[in-house]
Image (tube, rainbow, N blue to C red):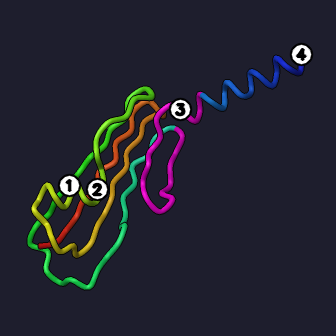
Amino acid sequence: MKKLIGYSALVAVAGLLVGCVGPMGPAGSVGGSIYTDVSGPVLATSHSAASKVGTATSTGVLGFAWGDSSIKAAASNAGITKIQHVDFKTTSVLGIYAKTTVVVYGE
């Protein structure tokens, strides 16, 4: 019985450290259990012009998530039809709050 209580407590603590909302950044982005603020590239193409910039964001708080941070949404928000490159930025605090923004550059 003591082992069962000990294992249950261990699982509960691990659950608290992991949190309810986690960053969903692409390409296996790094995530800290207390605070995360990372950004990086997603892709690049052969198009050389980048006169427009579009963004799309998704957010999560306490296990609830909303928004559309897809490349398609970011490109559509700026009227981009030819993508030059795509970046992302992910922020998370204690697994309680998380936000991912995708930035698309193109024409």
Mark 2 to mark 3: distance in Å?
23 Å
Helix, strand or loop at label 2? It is: strand
Taking the spot 30% from the left edge, 50% from the top edge, the residue there is 69
The x and y percentages for residue 67 are 28, 41
On screen, residue 35 versus residue 11, left or right, reads left
Which comes before the other along the chain, label 3 or label 4? 4
Identify the disc placed on residue 19.
3
Q: What's under tag 3, amino acid-wise?
A: Gly
**Badge nearest the viewer, 2 or 3:** 2
Q: Which residue is mark 1?
A: 55
Name the quadrant of the N terminus.
top right
Q: Which residues are magenta?
A: 16-33
Q: Which residue is mark 2?
A: 102
Asked if labels 2 and 1 touch by Cβ distance under 8 angstroms, the answer is yes
Identify the disc placed on residue 2.
4
Question: Magenta stretch mostly in which secondary structure?
Answer: loop
On screen, residue 52 versus residue 57, left or right, reads left
**Badge nearest the viewer, 2 or 4:** 2
The question of residue 78 being in magenta is answered with no
Asked if labels 3 and 1 touch by Cβ distance under 8 angstroms, the answer is no
The x and y percentages for residue 43 are 35, 72
Helix, strand or loop at label 1? It is: strand
Mark 1 to mark 4: distance in Å?
52 Å
Q: What's under tag 4, amino acid-wise?
A: Lys
Taking the spot 16% from the left edge, 58% from the top edge, the residue there is 76
Count neighbours of disc 4 (C-alpha within 10 A) and say few if under 14, some if 14 to 19, many if 20 or more.
Answer: few
Mark 2 to mark 4: distance in Å?
48 Å
**Badge nearest the viewer, 1 or 4:** 1
Count neighbours of disc 2 (C-alpha within 10 A) and say few if under 14, some if 14 to 19, many if 20 or more.
Answer: many
Asked if labels 3 and 2 touch by Cβ distance under 8 angstroms, the answer is no
Count neighbours of disc 1 (C-alpha within 10 A) and say few if under 14, some if 14 to 19, many if 20 or more.
Answer: many
Could you say which quadrant of the image residue 87 lies in? bottom left
